[in-house]
Image (cartoon, rainbow, N blue to C red):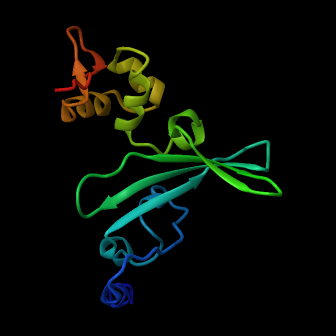
Amino acid sequence: MAGRYLRAVRQIGIGLLHIAHVTKADNGDQRPFGSIFWHNGARSTWYVKAAEGSPDSSVLEIGLFNRKVNLGRLHAPLGYRITFTDEQTSFRRLDVASNPDLAAKMSVRHRMLHLLKRGAMSADELAEAIEADPETVRRTARRYKEQFLVMPGGRLGLLEKRAL
């Protein structure tokens, strides 16, 4: 059914937004609930997470996490603080890493990028701070050489982007 539905939608010839549930199982936020074809047939999928425990019910913080993209690279996580009043609803950008509940849904690479803005750290310190395996942190730093610098002694830092 999912495959036939998505083929029919493509015949319309415009982009469409589809909203689906996720499962409650571990890693349930990686794909829509039901047939794998919902995820495989989509051109792009995003997971939207509301932060837990806001004491003020007029404020909602959400994170948007790109799980799949057919053309290009995955987008960095986006965050918004939504404020509701009697007269208006306002959206303001939010650094996803600033909210612990949303930061937990970020990839190891994005959590590393955020934390290393404060300064270089050893892989073990970094892994403990972001609650990741130290070997995963080291592997991520090696894989993304355009973003991370492995310094003498094994400390990790961020590479600066230089204007040409």
The residue furthest top is 153
Observer-nearest residue: 90 or 36? 90
Q: The N terminus lies in which quarter of the figure?
A: bottom left
Horizontal and vertical percent position of residue 26: 48, 56
Q: The C terminus lies in which quarter of the figure?
A: top left
Residue at (23% x, 32% y) in the render: 139
The residue furthest left is 164
Observer-nearest residue: 9 or 111? 9
The residue furthest right is 86
Horizontal and vertical percent position of residue 138: 26, 27
Horizontal and vertical percent position of residue 71: 23, 61
Q: Is residue 141 left or right of residue 91?
A: left
Residue at (29% x, 29% y) in the render: 135
Horizontal and vertical percent position of residue 31: 42, 65
Eyeballing the image, is 65 above or below 41?
above
Eyeballing the image, is 104 above or below 15?
above
